[in-house]
Amino acid sequence: MLINSSSWKFLVLMVISVMILFLLFLLNLFWGSVSIDFSEVFSIIAGKSSAVSSAKVIIVEQVRYPQALTAAFSGAGLAIAGLLMQTLFRNPLADPSILGISSGASLGVALLLLSTGAVSGHAFSTLGWMSHIGIVLAAFTGSMTVLFFITLLSKRLNNMVTLLIAGIMIAYVAGALVGVIKYFSHKEDVHAFVIWGLGSFSNVSRSQVPYFVAYVSVGLIVSLVLMKPLNLLLLGEKYAQNLGLNVKMNQVVLLVVSGFLTAVITAFSGPIAFLGLAVPHLARNIFRSSDHKILIPASIVTGASLALFCNLIARLPGFDGNLPINSVTSLIGAPIVVWVILKRQHLYTGTS
Amino acid sequence: MKQPFIELRDIEIGYRGSGGLPKVLLPPISLQLNEGEFVAIVGPNGTGKSTLLRTMSALLLPVRGEILFMGKKLQNYSLHERALMLSIVLTDHPDDLFLKLEDVVATGRYPYLDFWARLTKNDTEIIEQSIQLCGIDHLKGRTLVSLSDGERQKVMIAKALAQDTPLIILDEPAAFLDYPSKIELMQLLHRLVNTRNKTVLFSSHDLDLVLRSADKMWMISHGKPLVEGVPEQLVLDGTLNEYLDKDDLHFDAALGQFKMTSVIGKLVHVEGHSLHAKWLKNALLRKGFQLSEEIRAEFIITFAEDVFTVEHNQSKLKYKSIETLLYDIQKIK
């Protein structure tokens, strides 16, 4: 951001990225098993829906629009959660799902399903709108617990690889516990849990979308405020402290923000792999920067775009209904991560 | 009475382990650091150089005692006040792939920036000046990971300069540098002391380098109390050799060089003070011979007309190269 030419480059790239984001958003409204004309979608968006058949209005307004919003905000939120954790741990492989944080969310949700089923004798899924608040809280508690353990471990272990292995082990333990809990749960709840675990951007209904968007926005807005501490933490804890940063406090804030984003998104859309890991790398490579003033907006836009793109793939014509979004993001995200790792070697030696 | 810039009062440095007693590395230290001084902490690895520097940078609390900055306890300054008082250069560098040189130097201005870290015109000027003073303008636009160790060290020093603090603390700044880069680095630090009135405190295990550059030395060794002094004074009163802590190495005050302690011990007398005589002495010392001023030595070597003549047991041998000479006299039992 020092030199004017780089600010210009950022602006141009940002405008292009936002345009791609809008294009993908519109495509998400057009594209699906029911074909709806461009003109029809535009008139629905413009509010002149009287000219279009009511079924199509319902599909766009009640199904595709909330789904596209959920995808965009999930992608943006996970990207930010991943970016914060990568800077916090100074580890390019840090990510909510790899460190077992989304597994923690799964465990929280599974525990909630079991305990309510066992205590009240009713399947949790019959509780209606209450169940969503419950799942959000359970996922949040679960992911924060894992996050807490990861933070404790990160203080003791300076070795990134060890911490990563610890995170993967935590994920296994959480997975095993989820298995035990499923065994004791109501059939309806197990089914609901399995569906939740496949991940989907269509879980959030039209009436819930505003809440989801609001929760994620809180996380995104807070992350914008963290640009200065994030840039300092990039230098390492000691340099950051010497430059006047309260390192401990900011680390906790970062963990809470990324944990909150992961928890909210995992609760609503299920565990979604690779977006949090791949998008920050994608943003760094596209914008060629490590400055969080650039990376935070860049990750938000790139994350939203990639999630919308994955959602399009999941709804490719020819498939009946939606593919599990978790599989699609893995299929697209994993090659990106491999590409980034291969590219790292060139960056260590070259200037560009 | 003038208040000292920095004062260490009976501080004991060390680490607090989990639960047990703190591990104290050195006897209590009491000394002062004045403005505009260029001080080197010298001592073998593992004696507590880094710990002392970290304690003085407020990254670590002293086990006992207190550090005063301009009469006020270091711990009583806020994080922000400390950021304006002292800057650090460490041995580990940021390793983010896309971190550019200018971005790193710009972080030196962060203590002065607003909430959104917006650089003012004044900030960009200071960053530019710092980059120029460290002689790294030609590297602008490069990422930190693509630079050499010496270049990276200069970037971190430019960051410290941009931070604009009266005190700069550097932990082993010369450790991974080749010899010309070490000298260049010392010249840069000297420039900061002389032209910018900075106080510079750095650690090094490279005594040779410190003797060539530092204005003052703080010497530590395993368990011995810290001694301070002008390098030349420490050489003259024998403190340097006392603290060297190595049996096979000593500082030869007359030659102004470090020498391996003689292992063969055979006496050699080299006549004259010509350039050839000087470098032959160097080779002989390296091979473990003892130089003698007396002409009754076991070997007497003279140099004339491009030929070395070795006198030994009434026999005279002539050599054109130092290599064959060394080879032969090592064989003589």
Image: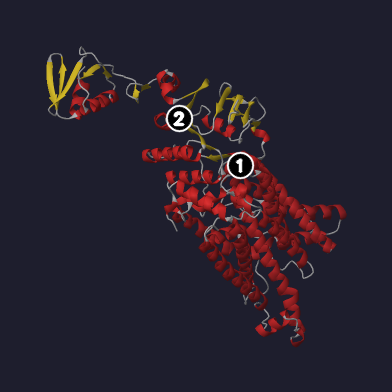
Q: Which mark is residue B215?
A: 2
Contact? badges 2 and 1 (CB < 8 Å): no
Q: Nearer the viewer, mark 2 or mark 1?
A: 2
Looking at the image, which residue is at 51% across and 58% down?
A: A340
Identify the image quadrant of the C terminus of chain A: bottom left
Eyeballing the image, is A224 above or below B234?
A: below
Q: As drawn, is B78 to the left or to the right of A115?
A: left
Q: Amino acid at mark 2?
A: Asp
Mark 1 element type: helix
The percent coordinates of residue B21 (x first, y second) are 65, 24
Residue B67 sits in which quadrant? top right
Callout 1: chain: B
Pointer 2 local density, CA inside 10 Å: few below 14, some 14–19, many at least 20: some
Q: As drawn, is B303 to the left or to the right of A73?
A: left
Q: Earlier in the sequence, mark 2 or mark 1?
A: 1
Same chain for labels 2 and 1? Say yes or no. yes
Eyeballing the image, is A95 above or below A306?
A: above
The percent coordinates of residue B125 (x first, y second) are 52, 53
Mark 2 element type: loop
Residue tagged 1:
B83
The percent coordinates of residue A268 (x first, y second) are 73, 62
Identify the image quadrant of the N terminus of chain A: bottom right
Q: Amino acid at mark 1?
A: Ala
**Color style of the picture:** secondary structure
Callout 2: chain: B
Q: Residue furthest front?
A: B1
Q: Give the camera-side residue of A340 and B239.
A: B239
On the question of residue A160 being in view, the answer is yes
Residue A122 sits in which quadrant? bottom right
Q: Residue furthest top?
A: B296
